[in-house]
Amino acid sequence: MAKTALVSLVAAAALATSAAGRSLRFGERDTFQHIDRRDVSGDGSTFNGKTYDYIVIGGGLAGLTVASRLSEDSDVTVAVIEAGADIYGADQQKFLTPSANLYNTAVGTQYDWQWVTANQPGLNGRSVPWPRGKVLGGSSSINGLYMVRASQIEHDAWGNLIGAPEIWAWDNMFKAMKKSENFQAPGSDVTGAVSSLSWNQSSHGTNGPIWTGFPAVEYDFVESFLQSVQNQGTPISKDPDGGQSWGAFLATSAINQKSWVRSNARNGYLDGTDQRGNIHVLTGNQATKILTDASDPNNVKATGVQYASGSGAQVYTVNAAREVIVSGGSINTPALLQLSGIGDANQLNSLNIKPVVNLPGVGHNVQDHLSSAVVFGFQGSAKQPPGSVTGNAETDSFVNSAIAYVNFTTLFGDYAQQLIGDLRGNLTNVIASAKVSDDVKKAYNLTYTAQVNDVFNSPVGPIELLLAAIGNTVQVQVALQHPLSRGSILITSTDPFTGPKIDPGYLTQDIDLQLLREGFKLARTVGNSMNDVLSGEQVPGNSVSTDDDWDQFIKNNAGTEYHPSSSCSMLPRADGGVVDKNLLVYGTTNLRVIDASVPPTAVSAHLMTATYGLAEIGADIIKAARANQQYAGTPTQQQRAAASASASASASASSSSSAAQYSQTVGTGNSGRSGSSAAPASVVLSMAAVSLSFVLASTLLLVA
């Protein structure tokens, strides 16, 4: 198979994105059978000159989630500006049919931004496509439907990096991801074909707008893959969605089990609003600039948004009474901030853009999952999926979803700890040699340290194996999940319709190549051991056998797994961060970023579930801000223990007092560094007659 064909197949197969109370109707209705689909408009003049409480830039996964949740309050108005078209219409089967993500794909069409990276020295000078959804629902409308969660270890690391574990560590993110979900257990045809399939009902939500579960049909080769991976040292997971996401498993997918069609942000969150009069959606128009009032340079206020349907088209303006929320995704969001004067002042000045907020981290710390595949044929007797869309809803519901996350020790064996030690010892030199500003180097330092200490030295899998049946072939894809290579997304023009320069910096760190190399060796072994269902290896074949051979194969064939992140990282401002724990852009009072550009490190997962959870939390933070309250999140176990100890000490110290004493402490967590944690929100009541259990209950009060 030609190299370009391999890249094309991998691209088609792997595309996936870049996760408390809810309106009950979301969970009660079939999102495709209800009569009313949310009305949208493509006429740019409809917003011109109007004022909305909230303007959401980007009608993708995160943007529609936030807009829908904000519109639950009938006292506020919400405007959504989306550059792409609606999913409904002549091409709707490209979006709605699950198997269409392979065989009737929207990738490469007008529904795809069709981004391309800069030439990559680490890929032997190649540039590679970066498809992203340019349509309502964003990449949730065109991706591979994977609903894979990252681990508790990774989310806890995120929470500690920003010093707000009560918001961004596992406990709160777990609740938020479940809030978005309407999980349905698999049918007997699926459990019969994949006998090792296991799930924990308590790890899933059942009242959210996004249907998750499994296709109507599965195949024997999937079970063969899971058993083969387990035989090579990576156990089959019994509860991959409950915080221990390592191991091999059949992932859940965003599929509506009533109609066997894709569940996405458009039909889940937006259609769920029916025809609420307080949310308006504009399609076919791209935000070109965020308007700001910088009369107080330390507290810049977003006042509105300019937008247009294309280069040279009329520019319109819509005004914001409360907030502007940027949900353009990992590419468009940093580009728009820079176009609006928010970014590295030196870079902006070089383009004659007046700096409004000097934030050197904008567009930096970019991370992406790099991927390619070992390709095999089917055995003649093996049952396999059809090689095209059939028109049968149950048959066409099949999507590739068998995966495995392989940890550092399994990949490197006895050499693992020495390699981790070498990485730690060399971090200073690696960071010093990076050709970025000192602020960005600080971001590298924090995130590198978290990855090496919290991820590599844990059960978390920095390599993903993904099983993909495509036509008459089966691929065992290998994807790097935690790259130490870092890149950038920077504008090169003041024209908003000229895309930014995308430089992911693939394989600039040798450990990334080492991880991929070992992953490919394992993929070959796994595929060869599936000889009950697979025939011989087709790509790369016997010509690749040595480490050097594998390195060249990777450099000549690898491309994106479509999970770019971290271009507007949530880190302390002094350490190259762009947004704070409340998703506010530093230096502004009412401009937030809510999308996959925010996580400070990549995760061992597909990004959809984490982004839904991020957006759910973001909406709650905004609601709390409107009520002049601070969003408290979910105190972690460590925070609860600290609050308990504090309460006990306080009760003991005041036991002789006849008067009740009251104190309240709310932790800001806004300047946290790696390993630190914010003071918990707590209410401590101390009087002799008050029981300790009441005191502990008081520490868990949430404000939102």
Image (cartoon, rainbow, N blue to C red):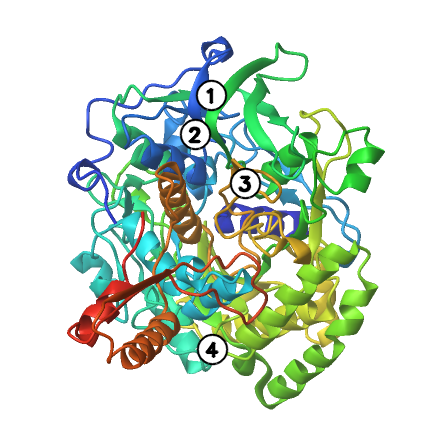
Indicate which disc, 4 or 1, sits on the residue closer to the N terminus. 1
From the image, tell me which residue sits under label 3: 329
Q: Label 4: which residue?
A: 459
**Crowd around label 1: few <14 · some 14–19 · many ≥20 (10 Å):** many
Q: Is residue 108 visible?
A: yes
Crowd tier of the residue under label 3, counting other residues whose Cα lies within 10 Å: few below 14, some 14–19, many 20 or above: many
Q: How would you rate the neighbour count of disc 2 (Cα within 10 Å): few for under 14, some for 14-19, many for 20 or more?
A: many
Q: Earlier in the sequence, mark 3 or mark 4?
A: 3
Q: Are marks 1 and 2 in contact (CB under 8 Å)?
A: yes
Q: Position of residue 107 (x, y in %)?
A: 53, 36
Q: Position of residue 594 (x, y in %)?
A: 49, 42
Numbered mark located on residue 136 in the image: 2
Q: Which residue is mark 1?
A: 283
Tag 4: amino acid:
Pro
Q: Amino acid at mark 2?
A: Leu
| Amino acid type of the residue that numbered disc 3 sits on in the rendered structure | Gly
Residue type beneath disc 1: Thr
What secondary structure is marked by label 4? loop
Q: Position of residue 78 (x, y in %)?
A: 39, 25
Q: Secondary structure at mark 1?
A: loop
Mark 2 element type: loop
Q: Is residue 354 above or below residue 405?
A: above
Give the foreground label among 3 and 2.
3
Q: Is residue 81 left or right of residue 519?
A: left
Reply above or below: 48 against 53: above
Of 309 and 127, the residue lying toward us: 309
Answer whether labels 3 and 1 touch (C-beta < 8 Å): no
